[in-house]
Amino acid sequence: MLAPLNNQERQHIASLRAHPILANVAALSWDDLLALLLQRRFLSLSIVNVYEYVIDALESEAIKATVRLILHEEYPRNTRGVPLASHRELLFRDLLHLGASREQILNTAESAETRQVRLASLEALQNCLNQPHSDLALIAFLRFWAEVLVSVEYECLWPRLSERLAHGPAADGVRSEFFYYHMIHDRRQSDIGAEQLLGGLTHSQELARHMAELIDSEAALQIAISQVNRAWELKDRFYRQFLPLAATSQPPQPSP
Amino acid sequence: MSWTAFLQTLGERQEHALTPHELEVILCLREEPGQSKQQLLEAYQQRQGPIEEEALTQRLRTIYRKFNVSGKGYKLPQLQRYLAQQYQQSGPGLSRFGLSKIHAAFPTDAFAAALERLIDDQEQAQPADQKEDQQEVAILQTFAPNLEHYRAHLSRCLEAGVRVRILLAWPYSQAAGLREEVLKRYAAEPLAEDFAIQSSVIANLETLEATIRASRNPAKLEIRLYDTLPSLSLYRAGPTLLAAPFLHGALAIHTFQLELDLRASDALLTGTLLNDFERMWTVARPFRPAPDQNWRNELKILFTD
């Protein structure tokens, strides 16, 4: 039952990896790469709104609980209730360590294309409502747009980011606190319906378990596939705004 | 109870009124018959350090008197036979398996005392005498509700150079979630409304983070997390081991505890438990809540990386 959906997801992942921008990040100058990351930040900032919208729109309390848990990870606290740095703050720190200045991050305006993609993403969620499989549609879009493809994007970017950011507890240099972490814990990890009992579940897998329960008919399956298609189109469109950079890019300069 | 523990207990009984030096001699006696005086002297020198043969002889004479060893012939074999007989009569047959006591719940003070003994032994031992496999603290739990209580002890263990191994559940594992659901559904006494294994393990890691921060010897503290289901909780301080099952109806520390002496002559119980600890230690993944680092992100991806 789930095979066509899993196949479609794998095709879209391969397609995004082969995107003219993401397949060629090695050729981007650091200025161009930072420009891309600063636009990408606007999508990261919008994640909270996307998650909040889905929580409000979902009917299933069990799925709401899963989505709520994922959202709350964005704002961690220690066990005494003291707030720790939010994931948006960690993104800010990673961008600083990658070479963006504070002013650059704060003053960069959202491009028209980024804004269109961001608004279209919220609109895609609105279109999930008022249909027999609205819960499925909401989490299918959310999972692919905000988790699976995010991990693919960061996986493509990581070879460049790792020139200036390290990872792991024993890492030399500045540790990535945002990009590396999301690359791992957002990723698809397994086909929908093939999650393992041992080992952890990524955010994608936590949502996939709900999807597997909801896909009980061909109609439901097609709903999920259409949402996956829509999420991929938006990500593809976001990166197309940078095609002029690829056209003018020079061989990468050595990292300072 | 092990032979050594038996000798220690017997030697400390008031009716015998042994001096500390005489107790040192008693502790060098073997359980098996046939130990010669020369072998006893060598055992003493190996365990306690140099001693003149005459001094040992003097101590033995007093010991014979205090134990009423007065038969004809050599006194040392008589003393050994008497002690071996007392040992066999000292407890039920389970003593050879190291079963010292059964507690109704986790014996907080007894474990603290075992930690104190371990610290004292470690501080007094010569470097050549230190056996790492004996001088160790180890805890296996899903989360340890009493970890904060022992924080000062753990810090002193680290300062004294004792290896400390902590093995906890990876808080994002499905196994941890399953244990939490079982406790919430079946616990005989209601758990706190906000009880969650995830935050309980993270609280343990925050305690260990504070321990690392305050320690001058943090490398001796090793922490690993597992994503499977253990069946027992274990608390070890040197030769003392407390083991309790994970029942449906209660936290492990509120369940009966078997106190075991790891110097047991028959390792059926102790060896099985220690081997299983080592097996879990092997499959678990190292984790370090490094102070001032954003370790919660590392924790989240520990088993998905």
Image: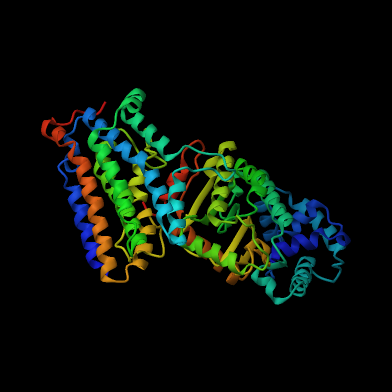
Quarter of the figure with the C terminus of chain A: top left
Q: Is residue B132 visible?
A: no
User: Is residue A102 or residue B11 the one in the foreground?
Assistant: A102
Residue B104 screen position, x and y as percent: 72, 66
Residue B304 screen position, x and y as percent: 37, 54
Residue A38: image quadrant is top left
Q: Is residue A90 above or below residue B51?
A: above
Residue B59: image quadrant is bottom right
In this view, the residue farthest toward the left is A247
Residue B268 screen position, x and y as percent: 58, 72
Q: How is the image coloured?
A: rainbow
Q: Is residue A112 above or below residue B10?
A: above
> Is A199 left or right of B22, judged from the image as shown?
left
User: Is residue A231 or residue A158 the one in the foreground?
Assistant: A231
> Is B167 left or right of B28, judged from the image as shown?
left
Residue at figure coordinates x 52%, y 38% from the top left: B291
In this view, the residue farthest toward the bottom is B93
In this view, the residue farthest toward the front is A130
Residue B22 screen position, x and y as percent: 79, 55
Count numbered badges in the picture: 0
Q: Is residue A133 visible?
A: yes
Residue at figure coordinates x 65%, y 53% from the top left: B146
Residue at figure coordinates x 23%, y 27% from the top left: A31
Residue at figure coordinates x 64%, y 48% from the top left: B148
User: Is residue A2 or residue B269 the one in the foreground?
Assistant: A2
Quarter of the figure with the N terminus of chain A: bottom left
